[in-house]
Amino acid sequence: MIISCPNCNKQFKIDNSLIPHEGRKLQCGSCDNVWFYKLEEKNNESLMLNEEIISKDNQIKAEIKKEKIDIKKQSLEKINTEISNEKKVKILEKKKYPTSIKNSKNKVSKFFSYLIVFIISFVALIILLDTLKTPLINVFPELEIILFNLFETLQDIKLFIIDLT
């Protein structure tokens, strides 16, 4: 049963067999207040009913939680089986198709990556030459004709690409 301290309203759970019918003195563990407590049949019965209701509620909640856990376990098992099936399908596809297709894709992708690196490097070289054109011509005077022809060729290529679009 649950007993409340009249001084601080702290509640304590006490076994019914510890308090006789004629009552006894109790001391609060929080505030050290001492008071005389006597059992009342009405309170005892209502507490018993509340305890039964609480225990039934706890049982119902436990059953609901078990059902939810079972549902989650079933969904996890379905997901795990689907994942394992997908893995099996992928393994079978790998066995069916030879690796030469992957190698050819890798070769093509490597070629395009090298091509992109080459183009970017070439553009960077042109920009560098254009930026340092005057100091280079001062050091190497014969380079002026070569750079002039290079830039004229690039202008022609640019115009040709613009005409294509």
Image (cartoon, helix red, strand yellow):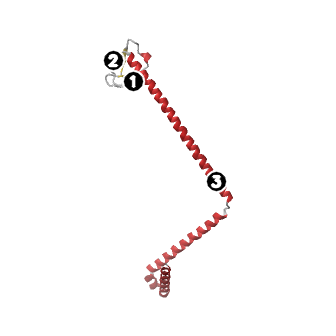
Q: Position of residue 75 (x, y in %)?
A: 55, 43
Q: Is residue 42 left or right of residue 72?
A: left
Q: Earlier in the sequence, mark 2 or mark 3?
A: 2
Residue type at the position of mark 2: Trp
The residues tagged by marks 1 and 2 sit, at their Cα atoms, a distance apart of 14 Å
Mark 3 touching mark 1, by CB under 8 A?
A: no
Secondary structure under the numbered disc 2 in the rendered image: strand
Q: Earlier in the sequence, mark 1 or mark 2?
A: 1
Residue type at the position of mark 3: Val
Please tell me the numbered disc located at residue 143.
Answer: none
Q: Position of residue 19 (x, y in %)?
A: 41, 15
Say if 18 sits above or below 163 in the image.
above
What residue appears at the point 66 percent right and 57 percent down from the top-left corner? 94
The residues tagged by marks 2 and 3 sit, at their Cα atoms, a distance apart of 76 Å
Please tell me the numbered disc located at residue 89.
Answer: 3
Q: Is residue 96 visible?
A: yes
Please tell me the numbered disc located at residue 12.
Answer: 1
Q: Position of residue 112 (x, y in %)?
A: 57, 70
Mark 1 touching mark 2, by CB under 8 A?
A: no
Say if 148 sits above or below 1 in the image.
below
Say if 57 sits above or below 151 in the image.
above
Mark 2 touching mark 3, by CB under 8 A?
A: no
Q: Nearer the viewer, residue 53 or 110?
A: 53
What residue appears at the point 53 percent right and 38 percent down from the top-left corner? 69
Secondary structure under the numbered disc 3 in the rendered image: helix
Using the rendered view, name the quadrant where residue 116 is placed.
bottom right
Discs 3/1, front: 3
Q: Earlier in the sequence, mark 3 or mark 1?
A: 1
